[in-house]
Amino acid sequence: MSVVQQPLIESIHEVDSLLETLCADRLFLVIDEPAYRASGAHAILENCFQKYATVVFSHFELNPKLEDVQRGIEVYRNFEPDVVIALGGGTAIDLAKLIGTLSVQKGAEHSKCSRDIAMGVVAIEIEGKPMIAIPTTAGTGSEATHFAVVYVDGEKYSVAHPSLLPDYAIVDPTLTESLPKRITAATGLDALCQAIESIWAVAATEESMGYAQEAARLAFDHLETAVNAPTPEARRAMCRASHLAGKAINITKTTAPHALSYFLTSRYGVPHGMAVATTLRAMLAFNADVTDDDCVDPRGATAVRERIARILNVLGTDGVDEACSAVSRLLSQVECPTLKEILVNGDLMAVVDSANIERLSNNPRRVSREQLIEVLSSEPFQSET
């Protein structure tokens, strides 16, 4: 299913003219303050924002929490803006999506409303004000998707609705130049995993595969350079990879590696992209062995294997084993920990039991709890240098 995509702007210097086009008067800014200043966005946008009545929401934790959403809703409703701007990584953008949309729902003044929507008990009914998303990382692709992550009582939920897709995305690679190696690696791995998962996803279409294949190729070819010896070309390539991967999963959603990642982030503090990447290689090998008996995709096992072949082509490899080795080398080069290094106390069953069922159902090959334990205990999680 094709999802409407928003205009893409490649320079942060266009914000001023965009706000004039939108006839903006009052701005609600969801800003990651450290990223705002380190990226250089502050120096560019400060004078622009001074032309408008603004309120800044910036005190929030990494990974969107319901409590932060609810605080933001209160600030939003007291201010009544006509444009929402998000600037930062995936947390800032997802918070802006949720705050801007949930603030205008019926009963939004009550905390129960936001909780019910976050947990999928109540549906979104009213579209929010126009939103501009300005990512300062190259990886989450949140500026290109119609869903947002939120943690409720420590459990991760994904809210999906067409109105959550930002109206405008400003993807300027110069904003990522100050990113530390670890953040560049984690966000870049998220883009790579999103792209590869989107290719094999049950919901994959020709449109999504077009986005995903280009995203995977760009990320695989440029991530190591962007992390260890960054160049403007590598930064630009990773920004494009991130945005295209976002457009791809906006159609397909993600699969098993994402389903298995959330516990690693919430329990062990592993950055999201790295948490996803730890299971990518094993799930590539597992999905490549799909049969008609365990295929979930209605198009059949042959169609899934054809899409796996596209992944091998993107990685420049001739076989699954070679592709798995190539993925392992890249993860080692960008210092992504292995699953066994993370689970020093052997908490593997907890990872499996916490897997997001919705994401697992989008995986092309049916996988049982016992199979996951076997797959995640296997050799593919050893580093290969």
Image: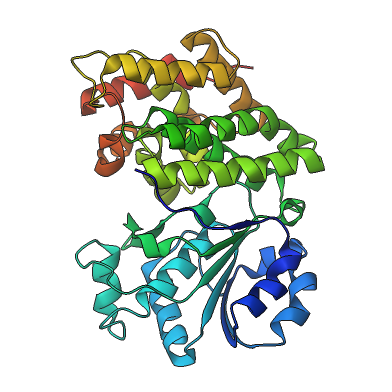
Give the vertical position of 79 relative to 32 (above or below): below
Residue 253 occupies quadrant: top left
Q: Position of residue 283 (x, y in %)?
A: 39, 24
Name the residue: 72% across, 86% down.
50
Give the vertical position of 217 relative to 285 (above or below): below
Look at the image and tell me whether residue 270 can be seen.
no
Query: Which of the image's four quarters has the N terminus?
Result: top left
Residue 52 occupies quadrant: bottom right
With 80 as the anchor, is 303 left or right in this view?
A: left
Name the residue: 66% across, 41% down.
238
With 296 as the anchor, is 265 left or right in this view?
A: right
Q: Position of residue 122 (x, y in %)?
A: 21, 68
Look at the image and tell me whether residue 18 can be seen.
yes
Q: Position of residue 54 (x, y in %)?
A: 61, 86
Name the residue: 34% across, 57% down.
160
Query: Which of the image's four quarters has the C terminus?
Result: top right
As rendered, which of 71 and 144 lies closer to the eye? 144
Q: Position of residue 104 (x, y in %)?
A: 36, 80
As rendered, which of 381 and 253 lies closer to the eye? 253
